[in-house]
Amino acid sequence: MGHRDKVKKLGRTKPHREAMLANMAMSLFQHRVIKTTDARAKALRPIVDRLITTAKKDTLASKRQVAETIRQKEVFKKFYSDIVPQFADRDSGFTRIMKLGVRRGDGAPISVVELLTEKPKTEEPKAKKSKKTAAAKAK
């Protein structure tokens, strides 16, 4: 029976589990997509959703609560400047978990966790033509 099993322990002590999930949340906010096991992905989702919901209040108290989990200053700034404004009109459902298959080494089920935000626009660098290719095309 699954009574009183609200927390997936993931085979770790409480401080280790909290630190691991906080680091995973920071990585998710930094890269927008991370690859992890299914159990960790399912444990990460409520933490990320709670952080975004708290950050949307935009008060000093909420910023301090979020800063307890997001300890890197650069990620904290990116979180408030880039990620939270994109979820201003959304109430819930900030992440998506997609199953990939199994890990080759130990057969663990692997998933991808991604934020449901717009992809950051990056300009594709135009390839510079070398003198040799330009001369070859001219002939």
Image (cartoon, rainbow, N blue to C red):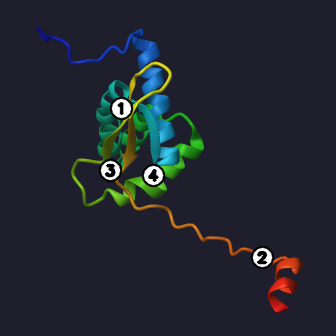
How crowded pointer 2 is (Cα within 10 Å; few <14, some 14-19, many 20+) is rated as: few
Q: What residue type is labelled 4?
A: Tyr
Work out which quarter of the rendered image holds the N terminus and state it. top left
Secondary structure beneath label 1:
helix
Q: Position of residue 96 (x, y in %)?
A: 31, 45
Residue 109, compared with residue 74, is above or below; it is above
Q: How crowded is mark 4: few (under 14 residues within 10 Å), some or many (20 or more)?
A: some
Give the CA separation, mark 4 to mark 1. 23 Å
Give me the residue at 58% from left, 41% from top: 73
Q: Which of 63 and 10 is in front in this view?
A: 10
> Circles 1 and 2: CB distance less than 8 Å?
no
Q: Residues within 10 Å of mark 3 (few under 14, many from 20)?
A: some
Q: For mark 1, what is the residue?
A: 41
The residue beneath circle 4 is: 80
The amino acid pointed to by label 2 is Lys
Q: Mark 2 points at which residue?
A: 128
Task: Identify the secondary structure beneath mark 2.
Answer: loop
Dot 3 falls on a residue whose secondary structure is loop
Quarter of the figure with residue 112:
top left
Query: What's the residue at 39%, 46% (across, down)?
Result: 114
In whole angstroms, how far apart are the C-alphas of marks 3 and 1?
A: 22 Å
Q: Which amino acid does label 3 sit on?
A: Lys
Kind of residue at badge 1: Ala
